[in-house]
Image (spheres, grey):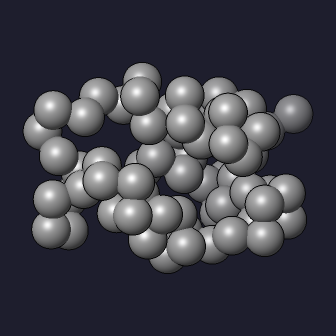
């Protein structure tokens, strides 16, 4: 059995949450995790993943896909 493609992860995230990558980027900015167009240097991936898992009930792999 093959692994899920990156696009399939994004599609599953949209189905589960109703949000696209651009929506998550805006939410990330609103949360204060970004400086300009990039993640702030003091924000670790684990913090973002924990937020995505807690607030959007994403599993680890789906949260990682969204993080990227």
Q: Is residue 14 visible?
A: yes
The residue under the point 48% across, 63% down is 27
Is residue 20 placed above or below 68 in the rendered structure?
A: below
Tell me where residue 54 sits by quadrant: top right
Decide if residue 44 is on the left or right side of residue 64: left
Is residue 8 placed above or below 46 in the rendered structure?
A: below
Decide if residue 23 is on the left or right side of residue 7: left
Q: Position of residue 66 (x, y in %)?
A: 54, 51
Q: Position of residue 37 (x, y in %)?
A: 20, 68
Q: Position of residue 45 (x, y in %)?
A: 36, 31
- Tag count: 0
Q: Nearer the viewer, residue 2 or 22?
A: 22
Tell me where residue 6 sits by quadrant: bottom right
- Which residue lies most toward the front here? 31
- Which residue lies most toward the top here? 46
Q: Position of residue 32 (x, y in %)?
A: 30, 53
Q: Is residue 8 visible?
A: no
Decide if residue 24 is on the left or right side of residue 13: left
The residue under the point 78% across, 60% down is 17
Is residue 68 placed above or below 44 in the rendered structure?
A: below
Is residue 49 placed above or below 20 in the rendered structure?
A: above
Tell me where residue 18 sits by quadrant: bottom right
The residue under the point 72% across, 46% down is 56
The residue under the point 46% across, 46% down is 67
Where the N terminus falls, by quadrant?
top right
Q: Nearer the viewer, residue 34 or 1?
A: 34
């Amino acid at each position: 059995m093959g692994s899920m493609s990156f696009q399939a992860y994004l599609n599953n995230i949209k189905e589960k949450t109703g949000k696209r990558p651009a929506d998550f980027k805006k939410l990330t900015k609103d949360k204060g995790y970004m400086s300009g167009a990039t993640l702030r240097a003091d924000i670790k991936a684990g913090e973002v993943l924990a937020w995505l898992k807690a607030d959007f009930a994403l599993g680890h792999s789906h949260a990682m896909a969204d993080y990227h």
